[in-house]
Amino acid sequence: MQKLRIDKWLWAARFYKTRSIAKQAIEGGKVRIDGQRVKVSKEVQTGDVVTVRQGWDDKIVEIIQLSDQRRGAPEAQSLYRETAASIAERDQRAAQRKADSANRLWPENRPNKKQRRQIHRFREDVQ
């Protein structure tokens, strides 16, 4: 196998649970090949660099093998290699998000009924 559709490869590599979810991600611009937005029918080959946005993070991976069959996670991970820069950036962003959430001020408890009524009255007055 020399070429394979990007949606099939993303599904086989376990980036997305179904091909239709992979298709939606591609159409939404969350998948790029060599920095360019692609269509679902784009054929990939070994050596291509794919950027996949999952949640808050971007993964930059190089395609090592092609497969159109979805198998176990260890076999799926052998289809690609994530770049060292991508791993370092994801770790840095995760640490930053963790630090940001630690500095956030959270209320000590939920508002009681009286306080909720005051909040509702305030919101109605503002609008």
Image: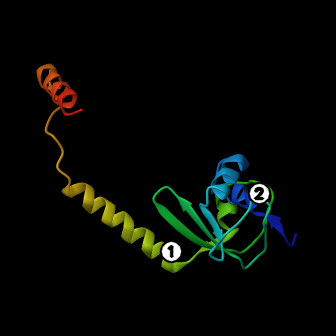
- Between 123 and 42, the one lying in front of the other is 123
> How far across and down, in percent of the image, does residue 30 sit?
59, 60
- Between 18 and 127, the one lying in front of the other is 127
Q: How many marks?
A: 2
* Residue found 70% across the figure and 66% down from its top: 38
Res 88 quadrant in image: bottom left
Residue hosting label 2: 8
Mark 2 or mark 1, earlier in chain: 2
Seen in the image, is 3 located left or right of residue 33? right
Q: Is residue 14 visible?
A: no
Badge 2 crowding class, 10 Å Cα cut-off, few under 14, some 14 to 19, many 20 or more, is many
Res 7 quadrant in image: bottom right
Res 122 quadrant in image: top left
Asked if the residue under mark 1 is in contact with the one under mark 2, i.e. CB atoms within 8 Å, the reply is no
User: Does 106 sit above or below residue 42?
Assistant: above
> How far across and down, in percent of the image, does residue 115 sit?
12, 25
Report helix, strand or loop for mark 1: helix
Residue type at mark 1: give it. Ser
Q: Residue 25 — which label? A: none
Q: CA distance from mark 2 to mark 1?
A: 23 Å
Tell which residue pokes out farthest to the right in this image: 1
User: Does 17 sit above or below residue 39?
Assistant: above
User: Where's the N terminus, which quadrant?
Assistant: bottom right
Seen in the image, is 60 located left or right of residue 40? left
> How far across and down, in percent of the image, does residue 17 sit?
65, 48
Residue hosting label 1: 86
* Residue found 48% across the figure and 73% down from its top: 87
Residue type at mark 2: give it. Lys
